[in-house]
Image (cartoon, grey):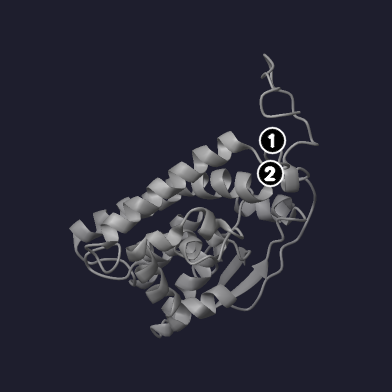
Amino acid sequence: MSNSDYTPPKVWVWDKENGGKWAGLNRPIAGATHEAILPTGDQDLQLYSLGTPNGIKVTVMLEELLALGKTDAAYDVHVINIGKGDQFGSEFTKLNPNSKIPVLLDRSGNEPEAIFESCAILHYLANKFGAFWPENPRDQTQCLSWLFWQESGASFVGGGFGHFYSYAPYPMEYPIDRYAMETKRQLDVLDRHLADHEYMVDSGYSIADIAIWSWYGRLAMGDTYKGASEFLETASYKNVLRWAETIAAREAVIKGVAA
């Protein structure tokens, strides 16, 4: 079927064969598909994740906390292979009913506490450990604004551009053009902001930088979606690249990516 041959039916029907690389995992219903026990380690913080941009956010944050001497930020990380459907296991869906990585389980209190959504985990850890979170209320508001900006924009960059550019069953001009345009617009938003700021927030390096760098910084440096940095001409975003390379050189960030 070509791009111009499709007419939406009156009622959409789930076709398991559609969806390209992830056809076997995408589905229109929630809940577990199988019984599966999650592994656990000795640390209070148990992280269930994978090395995606959203997963990298949390390991970078934890390594940054450890670099500050926050020994209680020690964690065990367990791979959730989304290519094999681990995120639909029974114990994982109890921690995150949305079946997405990452999930953090904090066992330091009287009752274990599960936190899902990567930016929510960053905010939780920043408040728990009092780090990478601005002290000034104005800067806190600024930090939250950029944090939510990234969270809302990721669906366009990852689910939109990344999917149609790298994973769709065949190249489709319209969605690639649409999502490339929006991705470049967002990179331009960043570039203009970083022209006058060293980091995302006036007070300095924060969870906003960690969240945004994991997606846009790594995209600009060519670390995500093969060929995308050339396709999007990310070298033209000089301020984004300066900021991205500065963060990439941090020891904790290197460890967090490796984790």
Q: Residue at the location (72% across, 50% down)? A: 88
- Lateral position of residue 13 relative to residue 150, left or right: right
Which residue has dot 1 on it? 29
Q: What separation in Å lies between label 1 and label 2 (alpha carbons)?
A: 21 Å
Measured as percent of width and height from the top left, residue 161 is found at 55, 46
Of the 4 image quadrants, the one containing the C terminus is: bottom right
* Quarter containing the N terminus: top right
Q: Position of residue 45 (x, y in %)?
A: 55, 71
Residue extending furthest toward the top: 10
Who is closer to the viewer here, 85 or 245? 245
Quadrant of the rendered structure where residue 16 is?
top right
Crowding at mark 1 (Cα within 10 Å: few <14, some 14-19, many 20+): few
Q: For the point 33% across and 51% down, which residue is it?
A: 189
Residue 68 visible in image: yes
Residue count near mark 2 (Cα–Cα under 10 Å), binned few <14, some 14–19, many ≥20: some
Residue in view at x 57 percent, y 61 percent: 224
**Residue beneath label 2, please?**
168
Q: Nearer the viewer, residue 180 or 73?
A: 180
- Element carrying mark 1: loop
**Left or right of residue 72, residue 224 in this image:** right
Taking 6 as reference, is 159 left or right? left
Q: Nearer the viewer, mark 1 or mark 2?
A: 2
Label count reads 2
Q: Residue 164, located in which quarter of the rendered image?
A: top right
Q: Is residue 198 left or right of residue 257?
A: left
Residue type (three-letter) at the residue carrying disc 2: Ala
User: Residue 40 location in percent, x, y?
Assistant: 68, 71
Q: Secondary structure at mark 2?
A: loop
Mark 1 or mark 2, which has the lower sequence index? 1
Regarding residue 112, the answer to whether it shows in the image is no
